[in-house]
Amino acid sequence: MEKDARIFVAGHRGLVGSAIFRKLQQSGFQNLITRTHAELDLTDTQAVADFFASEKPDYVFLAAAKVGGIAANNKYRAEFIYENLMIQNNVIHQSYKHDVKKLLFLGSTCIYPKEAEQPLKEDSLLTAPLEYTNEPYAIAKIAGIKLCESYNLQYGTDYIAAMPTNLYGPNDNFDLEKAHVLPALLRKIHIGHCWEEGDWDSIRNDLNSLPIEGVDGSASEETIVQKLNDFGLKKENDTVSVEIWGSGKPMREFLWVNDMAEACVFLMEKVSFSDILTNYDRNDKNEIRNTHFNIGTGKDCSIAELAKSIKDIVGFEGDFYFNTDKPDGTMRKVTDVDKINTMGWKATVSLEEGIENMYQWYTQTRDE
């Protein structure tokens, strides 16, 4: 990418898009194009067409998506498949119509079958049923991969699809109804630590920054305690306990979002679809499939181990309660990252270092 190229970062306010935006700025790219959802609804086909016609971006990072944790994915199934399909269909098609030089499409490793062999290889896509709770979201992201792949093969475009593992970092979603496991645990454990310390000022600051179902820091202590109880935070005999969904046994992989952003810029600058085809091992039918890239660390830990790491970093001295009436989801998810490692990129930030960085960011933003 040229330093003065017009680069559209779709979803620049989210966890993924904001990290890519920061990385591009740090790398000297100055002509960055952004739009908030209020300024441009990416599900609106005509609005997206008009935007591409007027702005004429040279490169596109498609990081905009409707995302959430197990509860949100299962509850809002229709929104997750419809909105994600519309966003990616509009942006990818208009990129083709307006001669975008290169596009990077971001998905997720939930595209792989629930019972896929571990670690997850790119070639395991579409080999068995998906995990039920996030099936609509996963199907939308699989469609995005195939859209990029199909446009490349038919029209000669240069669209790369990247599937990051579980991400965390600045600008993560800490809404306890919709958050993924790491930010949800970090927030609950932070509030639990403040509660055991009797630090109600910090609890109220936290709720003022992000109310829980409408309850902010101005509410009475009784109301706040009831809302914390609703989300699995309880205090008995001066001991605070934090509820964790499931058994704590599922294994998950986590990637610091700035590492992910470096991988995305690396793919845009160093890897083209023609490179992928050159290294592609075709089958007897000469079929081209699964040209996407996993992005991850290749290392995993249990949810219980994750909670223990956060507990140690926060300084929480309370207990954990594993609610086995809640779903575990897939029992193990760790990516095979040989493909992108072979191309020249590897993750560098450990989970412990990333959690420390994230907690420092989180507490600083609550104090502001």
Image: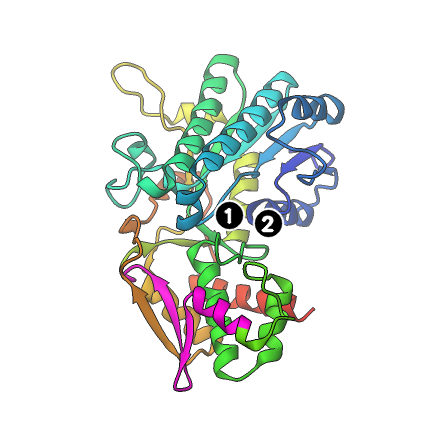
Q: Is residue 191 above or below residue 48?
A: below
Q: Residues within 10 Å of mark 1 (few under 14, many from 20)?
A: many
Determine whether, in the image, residue 302 is placed left or right of residue 264: left
- Give percent across and percent down for residue 37: 66, 39
Q: Is residue 25 above or below residue 225?
A: above
Task: Please report the bounds of the magenta region as a residue range.
Answer: 223-248
Label 2, on which residue?
19
Residue drawn at x 59%, y 27% is 91
State the SS at label 1. helix
Q: Is residue 321 left or right of residue 351?
A: left
Residue hosting label 1: 260
Task: Kindly identify the residue that appears in the image at 31 percent across and 56 percent down.
Answer: 326
Q: Position of residue 49 (x, y in %)?
A: 67, 21
243 relative position to 259: left or right? left
Q: Determine whether, in the image, residue 168 is placed left or right of residue 32.
A: left
Q: What type is the residue that disc 1 sits on?
A: Met
For label 2, the crowd category at 10 Å Cα-Cα, with few meaning under 14, some 14 to 19 and many 20 or more, is: many
Task: Please check the rendered image and state whether residue 231 is part of the magenta-colored stretch, yes or no.
Answer: yes
